[in-house]
Image: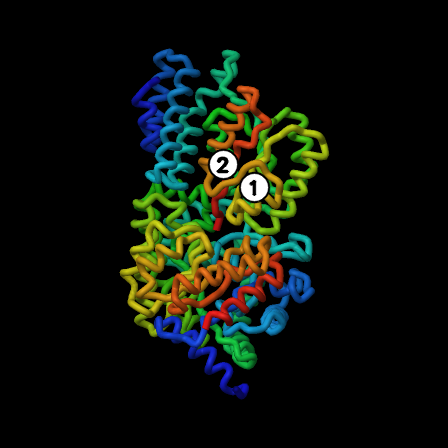
Amino acid sequence: MDEGCVYEKRLSRIEQAIRLEPVDRCPVVYSGVAFSPKYMGMSIASFCEDPQVAADVTIAAMDRIGGFDGINAPATGRITPALATLWLSRVGVPGRDLPSDSLWQVREEEIMTHADYDTIIEKGWRGFLAGYMPKVIDPKELKEFIDWSQSMTVPMLQRYREHDYVVMCGGLGSIPFEHFCGGRSMEKFYFDLYRIPDKVQAAMDAAFPEMIDATIGVAKLSGRPGVWLGGWRAASGLLAPKLWDHFVWPYYLRFANALVNAGLTPVLHWDQDWTRDLVRLQELPSKKCILNPDGMTDMEEFKKLAGDRMAMMGDVPASLLSTGTPDDVHVYVRKLVSLFNSTGLIISSGCDIPIDAKPENVRAMVDAAHESG
Amino acid sequence: MNNRLVAAISDLDEGEAVSLVKELLNEGVDPIAILASCQEGMMQVGKRFENAEYFISDLMMAAEIFKTATAPLETRISAGGGTRKKGTIVFGTVKGDIHNIGKDIVIGLLRAAGYDVLDLGTDVPAQRFVDAASETGARIVGLSGLLTIAYEAMKETRAALDAAGLDVKVMIGGGPMTASVKEYVGADGWGINAQSAVTLANQWTEAQDQGLYGSNESKGAGIGVDHG
């Protein structure tokens, strides 16, 4: 196969998987943020400091492991400002706040207040962020991040294309729940859901249209159809059903429909356990979305309830990649392949490949996918 | 047992629970008896969780209601020379990890269950766990972590506790914890949710009371909660 065909073949394999069509083998997609510099001998501080360097080392790690068809959601800017905007939280930066080889860490603290709900209702999402973000990140650093991302997203993603890697997601977003939960801190936000539900919902509804528009705008700019739509503290395993039905699912459904109507592909990057509510996935447009779980959601239930409607990208658990053996990983992937009968299945790590994953385990994940044909 | 108070706690009715405690205190009811009703309410919350009627958010809210409702009781119980403690547990997020949510949830539930919990905070070096367990005489140590890098720190902490000759049970919890991680760390117990930390602590404490402390009846319980 000449090099010009490699990308097309990989792209076709992934698109077929998304449409639940037969494939020559299951595609395998990289999702390794901190693993990349660790594996390549670079400090985490250097990875966080320079987005160009971060992209280079990510591609180098993918090349060195070998065999990947694509990458889930590559960073198109520095990782720590990106996390600050997603979580509305301060982020400990390696080399600045933390030792240079430690992992960045989102700080769990109550920064967003009850009064901020009123601000969102009155001023909208962008109006709120203008006053709020300086509480969690230096405005100069944030501006540099935004400027760099806007000007460099397309050339950055092109770098992956030049290495024949398919970029799954060019856009990134989440529902109001996750943003608010990050800003309020988990405990305080959960209490808000019980104590002041109407206020929280009003703020969510005020912010949501702008969130959707912003995400679609970035995704369109990127030129890639996938949109990473994250969820972690909104998981079914954490929330009472009455809360999930009210504050979580309606927003995912509306977000996903908006993305699909815009010609985009929602990638539901759902950490934690969402098994209880998998039946709701039947409400999503058929063969237009991807579930991207982290190993905690029951895949047999998913296959039974929604496996004929959407693909699954995942879900080799982080703990397996860190503490398991290559044989363990092979067994896990083979079980997935058997469950899905190689259809609608994109092999990847559950969430990100952890920083301390054994490279031989990551390689085993790739090998097992290649043996799935 | 005051059934209305038990129901208010177990039904997560914060306003009712808070006002009932005040009402009972004003009527001269023994604070220890009021506390017992609140703890019974928390027991029922735990049962509902085990029956999948309640979820983590409900557990967190229940612990918050318990904390708020019982606040007026603490000083009166202390002043009266009473006690409500089952024993001391040393708890913290291990070195290299600053996540506190899972830890805080579990500590709230353990306190509601009657344990005196010494919260060491986050990013806690192994030696601090050793010192705290030694100073307090705690028989249980809880290690929390969200990141996979916590595995090594947990293992080191377990080793340090053993090296210091402390006879303690170690429970681990957090998003990436599994049975294999428990084995790797050398912990005595682990689990998938916060409520099971209470179950585990109760099992160990009861075994201790019955002189069975050295047994290995610790499997299947634990303190894991994903923090996102």
Q: Amino acid at mark 1?
A: Ser
Front residue of A192 and A127: A192
Residue at 59 percent of width and 41 percent of height: B93
The chain under label 2 reads B
Dot 2 crowding, Cα within 10 Å, few <14, some 14–19, many 20+: many
Residue occupied by mark 2: B106
- Label 1 with label 2: CB-CB less than 8 Å: yes
Whichever of callouts 1 and 2 sits on the residue coming sooner in the sequence is 2
- Residue A351 visible? The answer is no
Residue A179 x, y percent position in the rendering: 43, 54
**Does B43 sit left or right of A370 as displayed?**
left
**Does B49 sit left or right of A37 as displayed?**
left
State whether residue A292 is above or below residue B181: below
State whether residue B150 is above or below residue A6: above
Q: Amino acid at mark 2?
A: Val
Q: Secondary structure at mark 2?
A: helix
Residue occupied by mark 1: B144
The chain under label 1 reads B
Residue at the farthest left position:
A283
Q: Secondary structure at mark 1?
A: strand
Residue A48 x, y percent position in the rendering: 62, 63
**Does A169 sit left or right of B163 as displayed?**
left
State whether residue A327 is above or below residue A234: below
State whether residue A233 is above or below residue A292: above
Residue at 35 percent of width and 37 percent of height: B51
C-alpha span from label 1 to label 2: 9 Å
Residue at 42 percent of width and 57 percent of height: A270
Front residue of A189 and A303: A303
Front residue of B40 and B207: B207
Residue at 41 percent of width and 50 percent of height: A273
Q: What colouring method underlies this structural image?
A: rainbow
Residue A255 x, y percent position in the rendering: 34, 62
